[in-house]
Amino acid sequence: MSQTGADPQFQTLGSHLSNLDRCNRCGAPRSVHGTDWTCPTRLPRGCGAVPIILGILLALGGLGLRAQAAQTQSRSMLVTAALLVGAGTALAVAGALMVRRPR
């Protein structure tokens, strides 16, 4: 009988096991795997498009509100516009990170 080395599932960073060790199958850290070391299920790749589109729409709405607030000199509209642009940008970035995550 020949000795064959079993391919380990996780790449260890050092000599000790860590929750930051990467899986050779899916690339995810050890900490996101199940108790029986099953790889986590992935969301479909198109799921990141929804937050990107909603973020862009929120940011555009905030910019439109900003343009209107500049004409009417309304301070509360400026604050609301800034919040909309900030939320839209954060949502678009989160969507982009969902799309670019490693497979």
Image: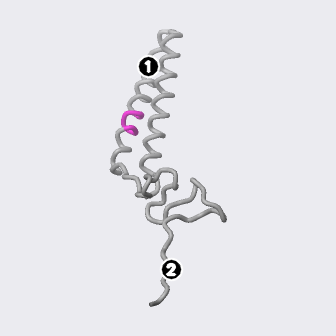
Residue at (50% x, 22% y) in the render: 83
How would you rate the neighbour count of disc 2 (Cα within 10 Å): few for under 14, some for 14-19, many for 20 or more?
few
Q: Please tell me the numbered disc located at residue 5.
A: 2
Q: Position of residue 24 (x, y in %)?
A: 48, 66
> Which segment did they paint magenta?
51-56
Residue at (33% x, 48% y) in the render: 46
Give the colour scheme shown.
one colour
Q: Position of residue 96 (x, y in %)?
A: 45, 45
How would you rate the neighbour count of disc 1 (Cα within 10 Å): few for under 14, some for 14-19, many for 20 or more?
some
Q: Amino acid at mark 1?
A: Leu
* Prevailing secondary structure of the magenta residues: helix
* The N terminus - image quarter: bottom left
Horizontally, residue 77 falls left or right of residue 12, namely: left
Q: Position of residue 8 (x, y in %)?
A: 50, 70
Question: Residue tagged by mark 1?
Answer: 65
| Residue occupying the far front of the picture | 1
Secondary element type, mark 1: helix
